[in-house]
Image: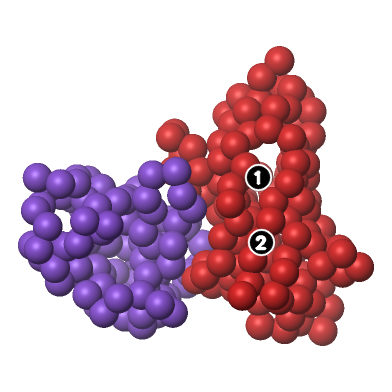
């Protein structure tokens, strides 16, 4: 099973700041990686697929990069609604999720 | 737009079978490009993919190794829905269960059903 490790566990930032989230795979997943946002009490929402393609309706302040084993989700300027938990997910070999990064208000 | 509507009980007794249904609107269960998944979320296990059913000239199922001996996912083309059966449940199966559209990245999620396994 491919294990995804997300870091940091918690990111404390202010609105308007830039957020950089990391996801590392235990073996190469090529570009078969997605990112999700989950707000409290809601289902996850797809942000990015194929490591860098934005899902429908996602603001362009969200961007993804990386391939192989190292991936990054960047939020260029945090809006109040962006404070949430973010998960990465690989679909190269079966389907597994990372443990999540919580972006909280500093 | 595509929507998934889940139904089923929120409380299941240990050793019994958990049963949930997901009704699809705005898409077809028999789509040649989609796959229909069940995912659960719990504090101890995080987000865990359980399995999927999909149609590519015939029906296929894939299941996670962790639940493979206990799970069945069935499509129902007459009602455009699919179901989850998880047998021999224990308290460790307590979680929020989601039905989700794939096939790989998950773009449409159901509202979630909190299922508690308790006597």
Residue B40 horizontal side relative to residue B25, left or right: left
Tell me whether circle 1 and circle 2 mark residues in contact (CB < 8 Å): no
Pointer 1 or 2: first along the chain: 2
Quarter of the view holding residue B61: bottom right
The residue positioned farthest toward the top in the image shown: B119
Viewer-nearest residue: B79 or A87: B79
Binning the other alpha carbons within 10 Å of mark 2 as few (below 14), some (14 to 19) or many (20 upward) gives: many
Is residue A57 shown above or below B113?
below
Viewer-nearest residue: A77 or B93: A77
Same chain assignment for discs 1 and 2: yes
Is residue A32 shown above or below A15?
below
Which tint is chain A? purple
Q: Secondary structure at mark 1?
A: loop
- Can residue A8 be spotted in the picture? yes
Residue A104, given in percent of the width and then of the height, sits at 19, 46
Q: Which mark is residue B67?
A: 1
Viewer-nearest residue: B84 or A23: B84
Residue B19, given in percent of the width and then of the height, sits at 77, 41
Q: Secondary structure at mark 2?
A: strand
Residue B109, given in percent of the width and then of the height, sits at 56, 60
Mark 1 belongs to chain: B
Q: How is the image coloured?
A: by chain
Residue matched to label 2: B4
Which tint is chain B? red
Q: Marks 1/2: CA distance?
A: 23 Å
- Can residue A67 be spotted in the picture? no
């Amino acid at each position: 099973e491919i294990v995804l490790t997300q870091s940091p566990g918690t990111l404390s930032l202010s609105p308007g700041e830039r957020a950089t989230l990391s996801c590392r795979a235990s073996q190469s997943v090529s570009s078969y990686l997605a990112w999700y946002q989950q707000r409290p009490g809601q289902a996850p929402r797809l942000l990015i697929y194929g490591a860098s393609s934005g899902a429908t309706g996602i603001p362009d302040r969200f961007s993804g990069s990386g391939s192989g084993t190292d991936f990054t989700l960047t939020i260029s300027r945090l809006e109040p609604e962006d404070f949430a938990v973010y998960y990465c997910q690989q679909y190269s070999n079966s389907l597994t999720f990372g443990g999540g990064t919580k972006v909280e208000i500093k | 737009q595509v929507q998934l509507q889940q139904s089923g009980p929120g409380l299941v007794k240990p050793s019994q079978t958990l049963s949930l249904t997901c009704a699809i609107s705005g898409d077809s269960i028999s789509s040649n490009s989609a796959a229909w998944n069940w995912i659960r979320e719990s504090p101890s296990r995080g987000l865990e993919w359980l399995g999927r059913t999909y149609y590519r000239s015939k029906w296929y199922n894939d299941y996670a190794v962790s639940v493979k001996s206990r799970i069945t996912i069935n499509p129902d083309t007459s009602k455009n829905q699919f179901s989850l059966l998880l047998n021999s449940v224990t308290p460790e199966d307590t979680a929020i269960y989601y039905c989700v559209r794939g096939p790989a990245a998950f773009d449409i999620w159901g509202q979630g059903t909190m299922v508690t396994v308790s006597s």
